[in-house]
Amino acid sequence: MKYASRLSLEGLEPLLAALRTRAGLREKNFGVFYWRSKPYLHFHEDPAGLFADVMMEGAWVRFAVNTPAEREALLGAVDRVVG
């Protein structure tokens, strides 16, 4: 699975904008977020769609982000960690 292209990430702009409002998250590169100076969230794409990998309790957890409900689930998980 490859990292998401800029074009794919541009399609997620409302989600990226919401992530940018979370206190403590810093977007180091377009679509790549750090929390507490460590890699925290980035995106991948493959034929099945777009996915976000989020560092949770020392392991990367993958979230699909293809539907509004999936994007809300991602934001909820992020809020539980960075709260």
Image (spheres, rainbow, N blue to C red):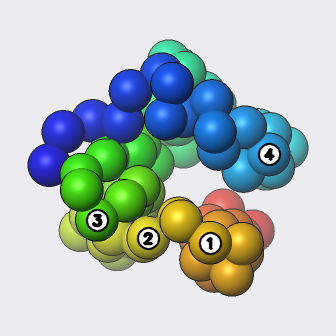
| Contact, mark 2 vs mark 1 (Cβ under 8 Å) | yes
Within the image, what quadrant is residue 26 found in?
top right
| Contact, mark 2 vs mark 3 (Cβ under 8 Å) | yes
| Disc 1 to disc 3, C-alpha distance | 12 Å
Q: Amino acid at mark 4?
A: Pro
Q: Residue at x 80, y 45 (%)?
A: 14
**Is 29 situated above or below 43?**
above
Q: Position of residue 77 (x, y in %)?
A: 60, 77
Secondary structure beneath dot 4 equals helix
Q: Amino acid at mark 1?
A: Thr
The first of marks 4 and 3 along the sequence is: 4
Q: Position of residue 75 (x, y in %)?
A: 69, 68
Q: Which residue is mark 1?
A: 67
Q: Which residue is mark 2?
A: 64
Q: Residue at x 69, y 81 (%)?
A: 69
Question: Label 3: few (<14), some or many (≥20) within 10 Å?
Answer: few
Q: Position of residue 59 (x, y in %)?
A: 23, 68
Q: Which residue is mark 3?
A: 48
**Where residue 58 is drawn, which disc sits there?**
none
Q: Position of residue 58 (x, y in %)?
A: 26, 66
Q: Nearer the viewer, mark 4 or mark 1?
A: 1
